[in-house]
Image (cartoon, rainbow, N blue to C red):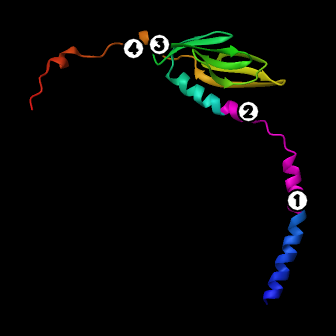
Amino acid sequence: MNLTRLILALLITLTILPLCSETFNLVSNINFDYNEVNDELALVDLRRIMLLAYDLDVRYDEINFIYQDKDYSLAMNNNNLVLSPGYQLFIADVDELYFEIRNNCVYVIYQRKNKNYEKVISSAAGFYLDEFFDCHDDSDDDIDVQV
């Protein structure tokens, strides 16, 4: 009984082996572009920043905004999409890059190796500080707390 199971397992393994070998051969020939994955991961971070940004000024070649009470600029520098001041890289090795507003959304449109990409990075409306008002009530400051 054990010998029969062993022979049956060996036959099954020998019939599956050429199929596995051919599968590994085909999968090894797939070209995978890691830049696209890196772009998507970086754009998630950029969208988080843009969500908290306000006073957006979108131009063809750059976006200026305020984030955490500091002025920032998002533009192409040395074929990379970079947030400055500082040097936070979001999209690397692009041939051409520009910004566009469509349907109340800010798009970054770029080209790499003759392939075009178009990604939404923010809402065009954004926040404007002059739309907010001071809701702090000074009368609460005069209350004495007794323990």
Establish if 35 lies above or below 25: above
Assess whether residue 33 is covered by the magenta stretch.
yes
Residue 64 percent across, percent down from the top left: 58, 11
Residue 41 percent across, percent down from the top left: 64, 33
Which residue is found at the position 15% from the left and 17% from the top?
A: 142
Assess whether residue 107 is covered by the magenta stretch.
no
Residue 66 placement, left or right of 111 = left
| Circle 2 crowding by C-alpha within 10 Å: few under 14, some 14–19, many from 20 | few
Q: Which portion, as a residue range, is magenta?
A: 19-40
Which residue ends up furthest to the left in the rendered image? Answer: 146
Marker disc for residue 128: 3
Task: Pick the quarter of the image with the C terminus.
Answer: top left
Q: CA distance from mark 3 to mark 4?
A: 8 Å
Along the polypeptide, which appears first: circle 2 or circle 3? Answer: 2
**Element under disc 1:** helix
Q: Amino acid at mark 2?
A: Glu
Along the polypeptide, which appears first: circle 1 or circle 4? Answer: 1
Residue 35 placement, left or right of 127 = right
| Figure quadrant of residue 115 | top right
| Figure quadrant of residue 33 | top right
Task: Pick the quarter of the image with the N terminus.
Answer: bottom right
Q: CA distance from mark 2 to mark 3?
A: 33 Å
Q: Which residue is mark 2?
A: 36
Q: Amino acid at mark 4?
A: Phe
